[in-house]
Image: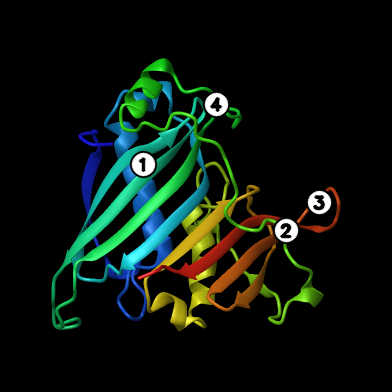
Amino acid sequence: MEGARYFEVDYRVRTGDVDQEMRVRLDAVARYLQDIANDNIEATEFHSTDPFWIVRRTVIDVIRPISWPATVTAQRWCGALSTRWTNMRVRLTAEHETNRFNPEARPEGLIETEAFWINVNDQGMPSRLTDEAFEMLSSMTDVHRLRWKSMNPEQAPTADEVDLPDREHVLRSTDFDPFKHLNNAAYLEAVEDELQGHPDLVDVPHRAVIEYLRPIVPGTALTVRRVREPGRLLMWVLMDDTASGEQVVASTVSVVPLPV
């Protein structure tokens, strides 16, 4: 919305953020989004009144890749909201530098993102925003009736219906947060592993959409099911359901080229 306020902070791109082509990875983008969310809430009084949020979906549009060395400028604002959840937009821009390891000039980086955040209470249940939080966030957007609609196919095909074999994804203790939930960035490490085999998607402007359906806790065994279609990669992260003894979908991913 014209003239709306936003929160801005700079982050330095580190070598741990980039792939072998020195491009910032999707999991690093997710960490930037987590960092600015934490920094944003700490800069307001809402770290006391509305402190608990979970991410239901993240959309990442890599329009022009960001690479090392560079400083990322992140701008965060509310794009839409309802009484219990919001779409938070974050724009990442970077003016690239050169060094002996990456001496070529590159165009400015641009990544646009949007994340569906749910406000929850200390029991993890969806909760109404305080009046003060709703007033502040609603001043940034005219869309005050945000509804959830999935962007990815939630139903995974059976193993017999896909051409690619399932792949195990091994988790580490460092992938989990203090609440014993898998860190959002760790999901995207599995996506980065898969994208190594699909350069036609990552070498052009592209969109990655990840939707989180179920929490993953330490000790969970994960299987990744993949389908490559013309112009689209689909992934389902599967985990064992102890109640039914069957595999259920923990998260879904799609990666598609953006129109140029």
In which quadrant of the rendered view does residue 125 lie? top right
Mark 3–mark 1 Cα distance, whole angstroms, equals 33 Å
Q: Which residue is mark 2?
A: 155
Whichever of labels 1 and 4 marks the residue nearer the N terminus, that label is: 1
Q: Which residue is mark 3?
A: 242
Whichever of labels 3 and 1 marks the residue nearer the N terminus, that label is: 1
Dot in front, 4 or 2: 2
Mark 3–mark 4 Cα distance, whole angstroms, equals 26 Å
Give residue 121's mark: 4
Q: Which residue is mark 1?
A: 37
Mark 2–mark 1 Cα distance, whole angstroms, equals 30 Å
The picture places residue 167, in percent across and down from the top left corner, at 66, 75
Q: Is residue 221 left or right of residue 125?
A: right
Q: Secondary structure at mark 3?
A: loop
- Residue drawn at (81%, 76%), measured in percent from left and top? 160
Whichever of labels 2 and 1 marks the residue nearer the N terminus, that label is: 1
**Mark 2 belongs to which amino acid?**
Gln
- Residue drawn at (22%, 43%), measured in percent from left and top? 8
- Residue drawn at (31%, 32%), measured in percent from left and top? 140
**Mark 1 belongs to which amino acid?**
Ala
Whichever of labels 3 and 4 marks the residue nearer the N terminus, that label is: 4
Mark 4–mark 2 Cα distance, whole angstroms, equals 29 Å
**Mark 3 belongs to which amino acid?**
Thr
Mark 2–mark 3 Cα distance, whole angstroms, equals 19 Å
Residue with the most extreme top position: 131
Judge whether residue 246 can be spotted in this image. Answer: yes
In which quadrant of the rendered view does residue 93 lie? bottom left
